[in-house]
Amino acid sequence: RGYLVARQRCSVRAFEVPSAALLADAAAETSAVISLDALGNDIFFFLLASVVVVPLSRVLNVTPVLGFLAVGCAAGPFGLGILSDSEANVQLGDLGIVFLLFIEGLQLSPDRLLKLGNFFKLGLAQFILTIAAITAANLYLGPQVLPAAERFILLDDELVRPILSTPVLAFCLAGAGALSSSAFVLPELKQRGWEERADGTAALAVLLLQDIAVAPLLVLLPLVAGSGPQSSAELGVLVAKATFGFGGVLVAGSVLLRQIFSVVAAARSSETFVAATLLVAIGMGVAADALGLSTTTGAFAAGVLLAGSQYRQQIEADIKPFEGILLGIFFMTAGANLDPALCVAEWPTLLSGILAFLGAKLGLLFGLGAF
């Protein structure tokens, strides 16, 4: 009898295991279908918003960036909740930035590239000094100023005091504050026609330097937090990958890219040419990311390598529509992450922080520009 009971239990368990596995597979498949449906709905909404926002912005004579941000905020999880698959949307929007920097690289003639080089010292000084100034102000000046400021401004102590008393938080905030968004600034420069002016060239040089500086900053932040490479050898490997590895990619790209486009152009297939353009822009970004640099750095480098190519204008014409649509998605996803209720509740702290950041960066840039 005991044998029969044990055998019956084993038979039941044998059926339970496949059943559990089948249920898990069905749940995963259902989740994937729901995720695809949500992404499809989001893409439909993005395209609809792009058709409406750009013409309306031109009628109102405002930048489309503000329109995309407002639409994203209204449709995001803190608004109407229309947008759902935020992670996939962010990745789509990031492609817009990749294509934006790729086109910027395509438009760099040797003369303009030389002009950019004249402003790299400004970008490097702005980046380093902004981090140093904001970190020092948070840790040394902030605790002295905060009691007096709280007499006139209702600041949130739970947000402010940890920053002023924790060196790691102060450094992370300073590192983020030293950077700017190419996706926000470059379209504005184009719209105003400032790209060829000296201040436009300086702005582009500072933005490119900041994109390049993202990689060492990402290496430095774990070191400051105590969770980075544990030995100088590991750190040396990271540096070697970012410098020699990407340098090798650039050398190979300078030889191969033009030959690849010559072969593709000989096929006389517009679809193949567009596919090759997308492949180069995204592929160089992926290569740079694998070597510890930002994807935008790789895309910009690919554009520079093709700037002197006879196919430059065709490449730019093919990729331009993708850039515009995906940049709109980037701005809408950025707006979707904005919580209006939190902004209203914390407006004194937010406004004070924004003004402090702008004052520090403007003061440093104007001061360094004199030299």
Image (cartoon, rainbow, N blue to C red):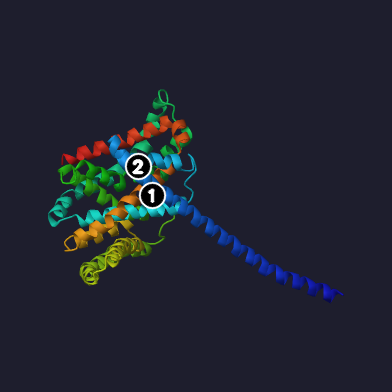
Instruction: Look at the picture and state if 87 lies above or below 267.
Output: above
Residue in front for this viewpoint, 151 or 272: 272
Work out which quarter of the rendered image holds the N terminus and state it: bottom right
Relative horizontal placement of residue 366, taking residue 23 as reference (left or right): left
Seen as rendered, the residue at the extreme top is: 152
The answer to whether any part of residue 135 appears in the image is no
Residue at 27% over, 44% down? 185
Work out which quarter of the rendered image holds the C terminus and state it: top left
Seen as rendered, the residue at the extreme bottom is: 3
Q: Which residue in the structure is indicated by mark 1?
A: 47
Residue at 12% over, 54% down? 111
Q: Position of residue 80 (x, y in %)?
A: 49, 40
Q: Which residue in the structure is indicated by mark 2?
A: 53
The residues tagged by marks 1 and 2 sit, at their Cα atoms, a distance apart of 10 Å
Amino acid type, residue under disc 2 in the picture:
Val
Q: Position of residue 293 (x, y in %)?
A: 32, 58
Q: Earlier in the sequence, mark 1 or mark 2?
A: 1
Q: Position of residue 294 (x, y in %)?
A: 33, 56
Amino acid type, residue under disc 1 in the picture:
Leu
Give the secondary structure at mark 1: helix
Instruction: Look at the picture and state if 322 lies above or below 173.
Output: below
Seen as rendered, the residue at the extreme left is: 111
Q: Position of residue 336 (x, y in %)?
A: 43, 43
Residue at 15% over, 52% down? 112
The answer to whether any part of residue 324 appears in the image is yes
Disc 1 crowd rating (10 Å Cα; few below 14, some 14-19, many 20+) is: some
Seen as rendered, the residue at the extreme right is: 1
Task: Tell me whether the residue at label 1 lies in contact with that at label 2, contact meaning CB atoms closer than 8 angstroms.
Answer: no
